[in-house]
Amino acid sequence: MKEKLEKIDSEIENGLKFKASDRLRNLIQDNPNETQLWNKLAELYYESGFLDSAGKYWILTEPTDDRIKNCVEIYEKSVNYSGYQILQEIVFRGDKSKLSEFAQNKLAELEADSKKKADYVPKFSPKKNKRKNTNSEYKQTFKDKLGGYLIFGIVASIVILIIIGFVTVIKWIF
């Protein structure tokens, strides 16, 4: 993760902020409990002038200064203070117990609002990166074998007929 953060920092320094924000969003999906990633993305959006997006990623951060409060307020206003909409947009897939007390309370508040207004609380299960088992052995069925033999037979027949035709043409000429 340290390498990815260094790459993100170099992209930001080189003006590739869109690419850096993309990488940060992917890192957040893989490591949702890392609030430093959320804050880094929020800072990137804030510096780029996207205050509502900054507020989206600062929503689980305790507002320590006015800019965080303002951005969160702008974001909440942009979604009509809908807890359901906010939960749908932030898609928190992590373990709530690993978050700060403020973040846990904020998520609980958003869930309560969502339950009250939409009568539904969106739940997002953790992302699982399962790799396909490449070591599993594939057994060919009779149909697979028959299909292979059939294709081989057709190709072989075509080659044989081409050779016979070529030999016949040569005999006609001489």
Image (cartoon, grey):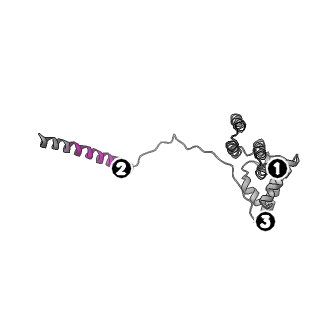
Q: Quadrant of the N terminus?
A: top right
Provide the residue span drawn in magenta.
142-164
Q: How far apart are marks 2 and 1 (CA)?
A: 60 Å
Residue 62 shows in the view = no
Give x and y (percent) for residue 82.
Answer: 78, 61
- The residue that disc 3 covers is 117
Is residue 89 at least partly visible in the picture? yes
Q: Name the residue under label 1.
A: 103
| Position above or below: 105 against 168 | below
Q: Tell me the kind of residue under disc 1.
A: Ala
Check if mark 2's residue and mark 1's residue have beta carbons within 8 Å. no
Instruction: Verify whether residue 159 appears in magenta.
Output: yes
In the rendered image, residue 112 lying in the magenta stretch gets the answer no
Q: Quadrant of the C terminus?
A: top left
* Amino acid of disc 3: Lys
- Which quadrant of the figure has residue 163? top left
Q: What SS does tag 2 mark?
A: helix
| Mark 3 secondary-structure assignment | helix
Q: Please give the label number shown on residue 147.
A: 2
Report crowding for label 3: few under 14, some 14 to 19, many 20 or more residues within 10 A (C-alpha).
Answer: few
160 left or right of 63? left
In this picture, residue 94 sits left or right of residue 103: left
Q: Position of residue 99 (x, y in %)?
A: 80, 46
Farthest-out residue, left:
174
Between the residue at mark 3 and the residue at mark 1, the CA separation in whole angstroms equals 21 Å
Q: Disc 2 to disc 3, how far (Cα)?
A: 59 Å
Q: Any mark on residue 56, and which?
A: none
Disc 2 marks a residue whose amino acid type is: Gly
Counting every numbered tag in the picture gives 3
